[in-house]
Structures are given as structure tokens and as C-alpha cells.
Amino acid sequence: MNKKFSLLLKKPRIYVLIFFLVYLAIGVSVYKDYGLSWDEPTHREIASVTAKYLTSFLMPGFHFQEFASTPPLAEYSASQYGVIFDLPMYVADVLLGYNGAMPEAYYMRHLCTFLLFYISVVFFYLIVRNRFESWALGLTACFFLILSPRIFAESFYGKDVVFLSLFIISIYFFIRYLNRKTLVNSLLFALATALVVDQRITGIFIPFLAVFVTGIDEMKAGRTFNNLHKRLFPLFIYLTSFSFFMVLFWPYLWESPVRNFINAFWGMNRFPISYYVLYLGTFIRSTEVPWHYIPLWILITTPIIYTFFFLIGFFLSIQGMIKNRNKLYSNDKERQDFLFILLFVVPLAAVIVLNSALYDGWRHLYFIYAPFLLIAMTGATRLLGLIEESHSSRERCAAFFIVAVIVLSMITTSYQMIRYHPFQNVYFNTLAGNNVGQTFELDYWGLSFRQGLEYIVKSDKRPVIGLTANVVAPMINNAVFLEKQDISRLRRANDIHQADYFLTNYRWHPQPYKSANEVYSISVDNQKIMSVFKLR
């Protein structure tokens, strides 16, 4: 029996294949279950503006009826957004005959968002497998990434997870470049970096880290300045190719690359939107969040066992750097650990030091979840190593206890994700405490309006139904998923006294509503995220 088990372990391809096939099947079966997030129609509009610019740039004088009401790129307030994902989605919509009022457009977007994340999970597996030389640890890391409730939900509709996906892919090519500074690896890393930056300009810190780590490698090698230009040639190829790819895939930069890049950088750094966010039971401005805003959100929305492993891995990585003194790392694996620390710490420190505007939890920094889990795998690997190193029965019991805790955590998290579906995006762990809805924002994307609207049109057959809501935009957006005949029956009421129903996702109003005529509600972990009140 033991021999058969050992043979199976030596042939991991079947397990890896089964894992990714099952995950793909799950994603394809549930992508239509999610509502429309607040920003998706806006990003479709941004893509249409860019598409109009492209057609006028490539075919001047030719006018498409599709863009009759679309403003020029130069006059559009959100022109500085990257469109590396949105633009292909818009072009696909046009080719397939979809428009922003058709659910098929957003179903396709949700599916493609998931497929991009799915591809990034494959790259995540490769990163961990190569770093720890274990396919089993690679799959364990993928389980950690997928069994992260908020990440799982937003992998179907979240622009922040699109950025996370591209960031994971860039990490893989970053490591390849550092291990073997060849022409091909430099070009692949440059392309991956450009895609990250063209999705969100925040990724511009990656080239700086590439220069920094390459410089450390040169200093550690103790070489003379002879042939330095040859040794730095791959870095030169990377930086020039990155600049070329970045401009190529970001039409906003075409007319004036340097000026428009600076405008985009400062525009995103000084984001103009400012509103109140619910944090620790108090409403504060998004431009005045305290330094602990992001760390606390990570702590209370991530399965606790992952944070436990992260703290151990972070300590071990820092300990290793201290032991190496000014060398920082002594081999390729330690260099990867050093890189993971930089990829996590630098962006987090930047938003704290710059006092960046933050809202809706830590979604703007979802991309640091990749290095977070990579550091966590260092901690998990060290603890799991106790199984092989243990000699006494007490040590073996402790090691197997750790494995049992990991398995139990995965089972518990899986159960919660199934029970919360499709609202994994409001997951909090036990550290968030009771009555979390009174302390933090819940359904800030407004996804639950879809279910609220579906209930109304199903239960009320009146030819005209007046609706109002605590926030109107997500209510209007999610009507796209209704049948056309039902949409035609709905009217937005200008005043609550003219409405038949009032819908709320409790955003900016965490307190219960006094109206007693609640006809429908959605609760996640005993916290209401949607209520429908019948007014007449």
C-alpha cells in the first residue's frame, strides 16, 4: 500500500490536472450567479471612449454610428484609466452584437474575468512549485488563493482582481528574469509588466524593484566595472521593451507619452473622489483613513490560518535577511523570499506614507495578496517540515496537528463560501467580532440589488412599479439581468412617497430601518445586506 502511495506521489500530473479541471468547472458553472458591480458599466464606457479614439486615430474621417454619443478621449474625465482588459471586452461586445443594456455583455465580462484569474492561478502554482520544489505545496498555495472568499467572489466581476491576476503573472516572469537574465526572459518580463501598468498605473513600482534587485545582484557578485554594460544589457532590454509595450497597449499615451503618463500618475495618486467610509463603527473620509486601515481589513477578511502562516513566514524571511547581514540573501530561493517581502511591503508602505485615498476595504491593494500568500507558504512549509524532521511521538503529534488544522480550515472556509454564495464578497472572519454590519461596510458593490429586483418583478405583477433605493446606481445597473418585459414595468420614483418599493443594501446606513413592512431580505452570517420594503 505504501509503495502504491509513493508511486502516486511521484506522478503528480494527474492531481494537478484534476485540480484545475475541477476549478474550471466550478467557475464556468457559477459565473452567471453574480450581480453587476458598481463600476462595471463605467469601465465599459471608458473602453468605448478609447475605442472611439482608436478608430479616429487609425481611420481619420470615418464615423461609426456606435460612437455618435461617445465623448472624445481628450474631453473624458476618466481618460487616464488603463484599458488593457476593458478594451478587448468592449470590442468583443461590439463584434458579438452586445450592448450595455444586454446581460450577455456582462456575463461574458464575468466569464473572462474568471478565466484571467484562472490563468493566474496556474502561474501561482508554478511560482510556488518552483520555489519550494513541491507540486503538493504548489496546489496547497492554490487552495489558499482560491479559498479566500472575497477574492473568489471578485474573481468574477472585480477590476481589482483583474489587476491581481496580471500582477501574479508578472511575479512569475520577474523570478524567471532574475534567475536567468536572457533576452527572452527580459522581453517576457517587460510584456508582463506593461500589462500590469496598463491595467493600473500602481504597477509602475515593479520596474524600480527590478532595477533595485538587479543592482543588488551586481554588488553581491563583487565584479569589477569591466563588461558592466554587457551584464546590464538584459536590464536595458527590459526597461526599453517595457516602455515600448506600455505605450503600445495604452492609447491614452500615444499622443504625448511622457506628459500623459505623468498626468495619469498624479491623477491616480490624487484621486478626486472623496466620501465617507464606515470603519470601526465610525464614518470617516476616504482621504483621511488611519494607517491601520489596510492592515486591519486584511486581518479581518482573510482566513485566520493564512495570516498565522504569513506572520511565521514574514518572521523567518526577515530572520534570514538579518543572518545574511548586508548580503540580504545567499541563493536564488532566498532572493525570491526577499522579492516577496518587497512586493508586499513597498505598496503597503507607500499608501500609508502617502496617505492615499482608500475606500471599500482593501480592494485597491488586493494585488499584495499574492506576495502575502507566498510569504505565508514560507511559514506553512517550515511548519510542515516538522513532519519530516520529527523524531519523537510528541513532535509527530504536533506536526500532524498542524496538518489537521490546515485541512479543517480549508473545509470550514469551503463550507462558508458555499453557504454565502454568491455573496462571498461580504466575508469576515471571527476577528471582526459580532454585528460586523454596524462596524464595516458590507455589500459596497451593490451586487445584492439583483436579487432584490428579481424578487419584486416575480412577486408583483402590476404593469408599473415605482422603485427607489438608498443608492440608486447599483439598483439601475442590476436591472440589466431582468427580462425585457419586466424592465419595462419598472420606474424610478423621484420621491419615496411615489415609490411602491424601497431597496437598500445598507451602505452609509448600517442601522436597521424603522419600516415594519419588510417583504424580502438577504442575510450573510446573520448580517443583513439587502432589504426590500413594500411602501404601497
Image (cartoon, helix red, strand yellow):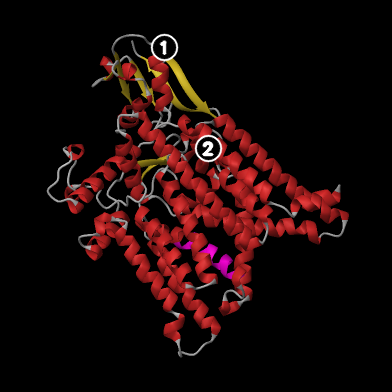
On the image, the x and y values in percent for residue 474 come to: 34, 31
Q: Secondary structure at mark 2?
A: helix
Q: In screen coordinates, is 470 left or right of 426?
A: left
Q: Residues within 10 Å of mark 1 (few under 14, many from 20)?
A: few
Question: Which is nearer the eye, 50 or 292?
Answer: 50
| Residue denoted by label 1 | 459
Looking at the picture, which amino acid does disc 1 mark? Ser
Q: Nearer the viewer, residue 290 or 128?
A: 128
Q: Magenta part of the protein: which range?
A: 334-346
Residue 254, visible in the rendered structure: yes
Q: Is residue 455 left or right of residue 179?
A: left
433 to the left or right of 533: right
Of 133 and 401, nearer the camera is 133
Locate the C terminus and report the quarter of the image it occupies: top left
Query: Which quadrant of the figure has residue 526?
Result: top right
Element carrying mark 1: helix
Q: Position of residue 129 (x, y in %)?
A: 63, 58
Q: Nearer the viewer, mark 1 or mark 2?
A: 2
Q: Amino acid at mark 2?
A: Gly
Residue at 39% over, 73% down:
237
Q: Majority secondary structure of the magenta segment?
A: helix
Q: Earlier in the sequence, mark 1 or mark 2?
A: 2
Instruction: Check contact, mark 1 vs mark 2: CB within 8 A.
Output: no
Residue under label 2:
27
235 in magenta: no
Query: Quick check: 437 above or below 19?
Result: above
Residue 335 in the magenta stretch? The answer is yes
Would you say residue 515 is visible in this rendering? no
Q: What percent of the width, then of the height, locates residue 365?
A: 44, 52
How far separated are the C-alphas under marks 1 and 2? 30 Å
